[in-house]
Image (spheres, rainbow, N blue to C red):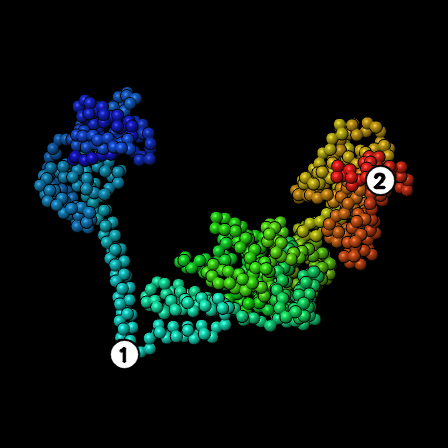
Amino acid sequence: MVIPLFVGREKSIRALEEALNNDNLIFMSSQKKPTTEEPGEDDIFTVGTLGVVLQMLRLPDGGVKVLVEGNSRGRISQFLKNPDFFQVTVKKTGDALPVITSEIEALVRGVDSAFKTYVKLNKKIPSDLLISLGTIDDPVQLTDTIVANLSLKIEDKQDLLETEDVKIRLDKLYNLIRTEIEILEIEKKIRSRVKKQMEKTQKEYYLTEQMRAIQKEMGDKDEAASELKELEEEIKKKKMSPEATEKVKKEFKKLKLMPPMSAEVTVVRNYIDWLLSLPWYEKTDTELNIDNAKRILEEDHYGLKDPKERILEYLAVQSLVEKIRGPILCFVGPPGVGKTSLAKSIARATDRKFVRLSLGGVRDEAEIRGHRRTYIGALPGKIIQYLKKAGSNNPVFCLDEVDKMSADFRGDPSSALLEVLDPEQNHAFNDHYIDVDYDLSEIMFITTANNLPAIPPPLQDRMEIIRLAGYTEDEKLKIARLFLVPKQTEANGLNEKNISFTDNAILAIIRRYTREAGVRNLEREIASVCRKIAKKVVQKGKETSVRITAHNIAKYLGVYRFRYGKTEDRDEIGMTTGLAWTEAGGELLAVESTLMAGKGNLLLTGKLGDVMQESAQAALSYVRSRGDLLGLDEGFFQKVDFHIHVPEGAIPKDGPSAGVAMVTALASAAIKKPVRKDVAMTGEITLRGKVLPIGGLKEKLIAALRGNVSTVIIPRDNERNLKEIPSRIRNDLEIVLVDHVDEVLRKALILDDPDTFLKNQIKDNKDFFPLPKNPVAEMVT
């Protein structure tokens, strides 16, 4: 055969050039793996075709087009050393004319017949080829000619090329042709089935159109005209804004002029339907009875004083003012404290519809504003969709998890919310799909979040932030007693006779089986107990009665999962009890300090954060500055190293409020005086020994009371926060207010003469930090 080849590899081009310069002989062989860029001797099949280069043409891209003629099979005997191209010694094979036996004749006829069938099924092969095949008597030539026109894999063609025995080659070729025929027949069946399906669809369409034409000729009512008339009546009745009314009339006029089969008809009709379905002026009457609203809020939630007070204020103002913009509140707090359920309760208290949109994971601006109508399948944004669902333009609209949104190349949904949640703008909210202004000002928007810093500052500025702190133990106990236990008792088919919980049992669940700010896990554990009791009731009868106490709770919930902080058993040197705040409530924080021979270094362990490490440095600096008053030798701090450790080292800890505990632990270790085991403390310190205020006082005092602490030392600046502390806690604890670290040491350390300890201190440390005569002038300078 004479065929053109396109060659791009430099090595092959150099081989062609060498052949043209000599005898034009070239050996062509396939490489074993087509993906190999630079094949070696082992990557090339040894059997190939010996041919002659007839013509070579260089192409603009650097490659060449070459015309070659194949002469005979050949097998590589040896690769000659040549760095520029492959050069080989070739032995010709399979050129002798075979003896035609009856078996070979039968195989030739079988191959010929099979190939004719193949040609009939494969329309790409010209029928003239069969005529030329009829003139070939040589089985070898017949085999090669047929193979050249088959769509076979390289491996199959190479196998036929390497097979020297004509009989075996004909047998292999026959099997390959039969395989190809089976594939073509399957493809033909698939095409036939698809064609029938298309014909059926076209037939149904044709019959449908005929039916419409017949109905029209018989004078039946035209459905399209009827639908348009109904739509026109609906437009006349619907009360909308002037802009929306004008827009919908314009679109309806366009709809009437369109042919029924136009693709644009559906788009325009959907748009009109959306405009008509929105609650432009439909609203629910808000319940303005403050006493009734207060009763409903108290029924649904325990505590949560600030949000409840804000809702009652809104209702009071609305009863005095004819129109008031809906408030935009943001409830921020840990999971499980009741943010979303409080929004539902507000809707019930104000007698409004409630809709909730979860924004967790939303990262497309079109989710808020919608898509423009130019896109196929365009829809309004979720704000408009949920208003249609509510059927009212003044619902309570809860935007849940507003801190979980993200942004990508499709836009920033938090930026789109700026208009929605801005009282100065949301009276004219413009959705991309609706494309007319919609008034959102009467909606009461309530957003919820776990993490306030994750909300962009411009969005925070548009909302009234109300923080929902985690529940205290007392609050959890009352919530469990008033809400969770009755709810789960009923949900599990039990009654008050079947099961009862003591307060100590509920406290054991709170302390030993849950560690959370909310009450979700508490409810799950109560439900778990109820299910086990339900199983016992089914087995033993409906008269079964079980009392759950702190002693038998482990029987139903297994071994304790958590431990809660308790004071030490005895007074120890270098061991103080601090107080920490977590999302799950307050905790006792043990601070250990010890001395060892060294050079005055400070070692900190317990997975402490940067702020807490800096507090430890400040504590050591203060103790060193008080070395002489503490009775320590002048070179004491150059001879020892200090090590501060805060147990439960796998838990990250940070914040400045452990400063006083660290000072006390270091001072105790330095002067070898034990710290009172029943004293807990909290407060940030300065290098001058000042004790600064801290946060989370309520949770910390509850943790102290729970851990059998009798005395708590707190900064004097936190005295104003004591009003928020329940009287029971204030009465059960001795709360000591301090301004200076020296007061802490006198109270916490077990001293021989605490009244005179550190009394010789320099007043206000003015000698350490002298104040200027004119502080303001010097600060300005």
Q: Is residue 632 above or below residue 256?
A: above
Classify mark 2: residues with Cα within 10 Å, few (<14), some (14-19) or many (20+). Answer: few
Q: Residue at x 54, y 62 (%)?
A: 428
* Image position, residue 2 (x, y; %): 16, 34
State whether residue 407 appears in this view.
yes
Q: Earlier in the sequence, mark 1 or mark 2?
A: 1
- How many dots with numbers? 2
State whether residue 480 appears in this view.
no
Q: Quadrant of the C terminus?
A: top right
Q: Tell me the kind of residue under disc 1.
A: Met
Instruction: Identify the element where label 2 is drawn.
Output: helix
Which residue, given by chain and number where applicable, does mark 2 sit on? 764
Q: Quadrant of the N terminus?
A: top left
* Image position, residue 420 (x, y; %): 56, 59
- Please tell me in which quadrant of the rendered image residue 469 appears: bottom right
Instruction: Identify the element where label 1 is drawn.
Output: loop
Q: Residue at x 62, y 54 (%)?
A: 461
Which residue, given by chain and number where applicable, does mark 1 sit on? 218
Q: Residue at x 25, y 29 (%)?
A: 46
- Please tell me in which quadrant of the rendered image residue 171 appears: top left
Q: Is residue 222 above or below residue 337?
A: below
CA separation, marks 1 and 2? 108 Å
* Image position, residue 523 (x, y; %): 64, 60
Q: Are marks 1 and 2 in contact (CB under 8 Å)?
A: no
On the picture, is 199 further left or further right than 247?
Answer: left
* Image position, residue 354 (x, y; %): 57, 66
Q: Residue at x 52, y 49 (%)?
A: 407
